[in-house]
Amino acid sequence: MKTLNFKLYQSKRNKHLKRSINAAGVIYNHCIALHKRYYRMWSKHLNCAKLQGHIAKLRKRKAFWQSVGSQAVQDICQRIERAYQLFFKHHKKGVRPPNFKKVRRYKSFTLKQAGYKFLTGNRIKIGNRVYQYWNSRPIEGTVKTLTIKRTPLGELFMVIVVDGVVEPETKFEMSRIAGFDFGLKTFLTCSDGSKIESPQFLKQSLNVIKKASRQHSKKRKGSANP
């Protein structure tokens, strides 16, 4: 198993992924509320399969919930179940049961075998929309899960778990000397002629920086307005 991280391009269509993350947070809190209510009523732990079936029925009537794929909803229920099992096993060591989370701070949702498709180049189709990402490394092996993760700064990352990757055997040679040159346009140039291009994350944000700079230049010194 191997985990790969890719950063998504900043785009207006990213609001749909952020909306899906918010919907996943709402579903998560609803599942936690159902667990607590079920225990108060029956003094028993709510079965994961029963919870998944109930959420699937509710999801058909709630348009906002449908922005999250069915497999992602199942993963939310399974994640809560794993957290409860960990609590049952290690509660004497101070492990706490899962609790409510603020939706705006909810971080991610996970897709397994459906809901996404890799296209040519650095494009991926999630749902009905196509997104671009920084293709910093090849994706080898079989993709097991794809997670869309939101950082506190609002950036989106794509976390891919792959299986069946054959790790190359590392060999050390003491008789050869390697050299590396850092540059502005080319991030790294090796002595064997190979090059590693710079990802240039800041380049896509130039328009946002120009707009913020113009707004800042209009502010009066000592003004309380941000």
Image (cartoon, grey):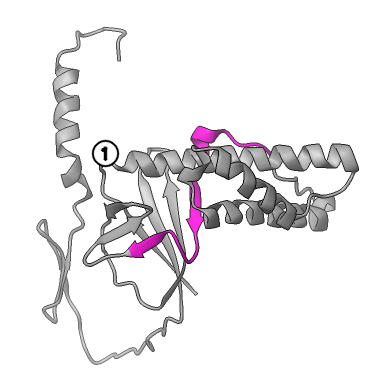
> Could you tell whether 91 is left or right of 110 in the image?
right
Q: Residue at the location (30% across, 59% down)?
A: 124
Magenta span has 37?
no
Tally the marks: 1
Q: Residue furthest right?
A: 43
| Quadrant (top left, top right, bottom left, bottom right) of the C terminus | top left
Q: Residues within 10 Å of mark 1 (few under 14, many from 20)?
A: few
Magenta residue span: 99-117
Which residue is more in the foreground, 158 or 51? Answer: 51
Q: Nearer the viewer, residue 64 or 158?
A: 64
| Residue at mark 1 | 12
Could you tell me residue 68's position as x and y percent? 49, 47
Depicted 142 relative to depicted 211: above or below: below
Residue under the image location 50 percent in, 50 percent down: 109
| x, y percent for residue 196 | 18, 68
Is 106 left, or right, of 143 in this rendering? right
Q: Is residue 35 above or below residue 113?
A: above
